[in-house]
Image: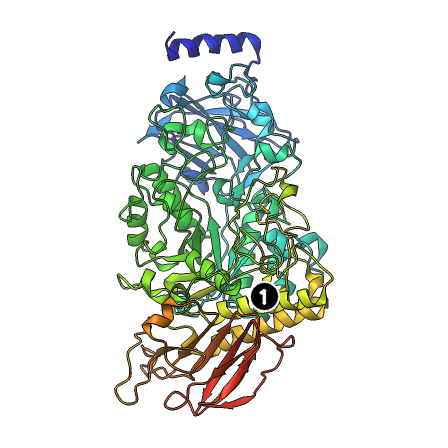
Amino acid sequence: MSSAAEQETVQEGVRAAVPVPLPAAGVNGRHLDADSRRPAVWPGAPTPLGARFRVGPDGVAGTNFALWAGGAEAVELCLFDDGGLETRLPLTELTHEIWHGFVPGVRPGQRYGFRVHGRWDPWTGARWNPAKLLLDPYTRAVDGAPPNDYGALPPEVYGHVRDWPQQNVADTVRDDRDSAPYVPKGVVVHDDDDWSDDRRPKTPWADSVIYELHVRGFTKLHPGIPEELRGTYAGLAHPAAVDHLVRLGITAVELLPVHQYAHEDHLLRRGLRNYWGYNSIGYFAPHAAYSASGTRGEQVGEFKRMVKALHAAGIEVILDVVYNHTAEAGELGPTLSLRGIDNRGYYRLQPDARAYADYTGCGNTLHVVQPHVLRLITDSLRYWVTEMGVDGFRFDLAAALARSMHDVDMLSPFLAVIAQDPVLRRVKLIAEPWDVGNGGYQVGSFPPLWTEWNDRYRDAVRDFWRGALPDVRDLGYRLSGSSDLYAWGGRRPYASINFVTAHDGFTLRDLVSYEQKHNEDNGEGNRDGTNDNRSWNCGVEGETDDPDVNALRRRQVRNLLTTLLVSTGVPMLVAGDEMGRTQGGSNNAYCQDNAVSWLDWSLLERPGPRGLLDLTTRLLSLRHTHPVLRRRAFFSGRAHAADGLRDLAWFTPHGKEMTEPDWYAPASTLALYLSGRDIPGRDARGAEVTDDSFLVILHAADRPTSFRLPGAPWADSYELVADTALEDQKESPGTVHAGGGTVTVPARSVLLLRVRT
């Protein structure tokens, strides 16, 4: 039997076995047309896409609806009243595959969705099913419990019969049950907020310090935030939250996904939820669960007020965005939006068209080379910049967006469009430069407009402090801006986003407390999460009462943090690392919406975490004050003609400049001299930029060592600025050492010294 014939036979069988008729269209009593007993639908306009409230012809107020649905045979607009009663209105106007209509009387706060009619033929990728209510890809707000508060996704939200007994054709049998009661609705939003009093910080890349945080996790337990605001945008805008960020000295928050997202069925069945939010379903809508003020459009205004509050404090807002895949997963996933609008148009399909090409590990990949998909993404990005006030984006699995047909292509349509867009080319763009497909690892390959998460920095710094580097060649590149990766095409040191930890993996405290992942609470048999942690537990796995082990761990945290903040490039901190937050050894807390992931602010009542916060604050203040620590151009390494000084020099413990063989030899001690005299570029008034010079000594061995400080012409003397062997870092140590003299470097420590002349 042919696959099409088999599908038709199976389809008839399920219709006989599951005779669930579609409900009759209801009537929304608030907006009736006297002649037809339904709201009138005028032709409207095909642009802009989505639902836009406006005053139409003859001064009549209403909402224009426009949906791109290539290949569809018909589209119905579905309006819902407060009781859930549905009114279906055919959109009969079709312009360039966009179905559109203007409905008089429909005002902000109105809930809506679409039903799209067409062929059901999964073997060719056609998965239209009008029984499924679909979320508008352009909706500005989402209301109603997403299909996640039922203990599992209800079977009605699937376009196919989820529990069909014949597994080989399970995704091909259409389910005709109505999904409307179980899926979220779009909301008509009209927001005329005045942004005239908002001032974007516009922090230059070289001066930036990024702080990655989760809106809910950062605020959920904060004692200074009113309880009703914890876990929300309003909570992050509260002075208690903003004051911590300002005192810390960061310049930008990078928010884990705030696009509307859904929870996966396998998590719900285990009583868990998607906490991180990398499962987007609404690229224009702020996630409704983070709103304290309401979900009928109020979340939009609340998000904007949060942005304004952060801007007023001098802090930029960067969004972590997930345009590489959606919450609809693979062919066995739910039908929530794009799959039911035009499955073949929105997703990359395998050659047989029934299954999805998966470069993301999440079941599907958006087909970014398609013009309407590219338009969806760029329209979304521009919206968040121009109307929501954000300052930049970090693109999850950005290599998937840069794929043309199959291979990653740095001349791909997505990257080309971004490069020429007058709005997007001016904001901060950060790539996670890899995906899970062949050839997906692209660190150092993105074009000059972009910065990148530099995981090679992470790995080298971790390996050095745990004693696992065979030599120091790679570490030298990482500390000095990764010129081997980024010194091409006009790129600068700030193309490297330096990080030691991120949301994905161990916290800084866990990095020195665990060598094995402990993800048992995720319910996946501890199989999830990476096994390549590059961590060292200081001799004991997990928490311990041993004071010596705990003291060593605190020192190692200070070493890692200090290394990060004196390295050339843009440092990224993870919320809570500055106060010793732990996840109990979990390196994949994506589904832990609980105390495992939330910041424990009571840590600051303890001496150790408070001392770590003081050190972080001091180092960030030092970085802000000294341009030599945030260079805008790569080091040359060339000797100055007059006195032989270099802008960057490397020294052995004997006080001699490193030679070529030194780079290839095992070493636990490395020192770099940063010259403040030879800083390229000029300030805003055209004057040369000069600064103090610094010597940074990194010593990873378990015993103290003697280090001969470089003498003339490098320095007459050195003032000790920071010593990570000290628990209390509130004040500068201030000790002065003569150039050419010897200093004792404590075991496993960093010394930061300022040159005195």
Placement of the N terminus among the 4 image quadrants: top left
Q: Nearer the viewer, residue 108 or 676?
A: 676
- Percent position (x, y) of residue 112? 52, 33
- Percent position (x, y) of residue 732? 58, 83
Placement of the C terminus among the 4 image quadrants: bottom left
- Percent position (x, y) of residue 228? 70, 52
Residue at horizontal 45 percent and vertical 86 percent from the top = 755
Amino acid type indicated by mark 1: Val
Q: Is residue 28 visible?
A: no
Picture colour scheme: rainbow
- Percent position (x, y) of residue 345? 36, 31
Q: Quadrant of residue 21?
A: top right
Q: Which residue is mark 1?
A: 557
> Is 62 on the left-hand or right-hand side of 376?
right
Q: Give the SS element for disc 1.
A: helix
Residue at horizontal 36 percent and vertical 45 percent from the top = 440
Residue at horizontal 72 percent and vertical 64 percent from the top = 546
Q: Nearer the viewer, residue 550 or 314?
A: 550
Q: Nearer the viewer, residue 42 or 364?
A: 364
> Is 411 on the left-hand or right-hand side of 79?
left
Q: Residues within 10 Å of mark 1 (few under 14, many from 20)?
A: many
> Is 562 on the left-hand or right-hand side of 273?
left
Eyeballing the image, is 157 above or below 227?
above
Eyeballing the image, is 488 above or below 431?
below
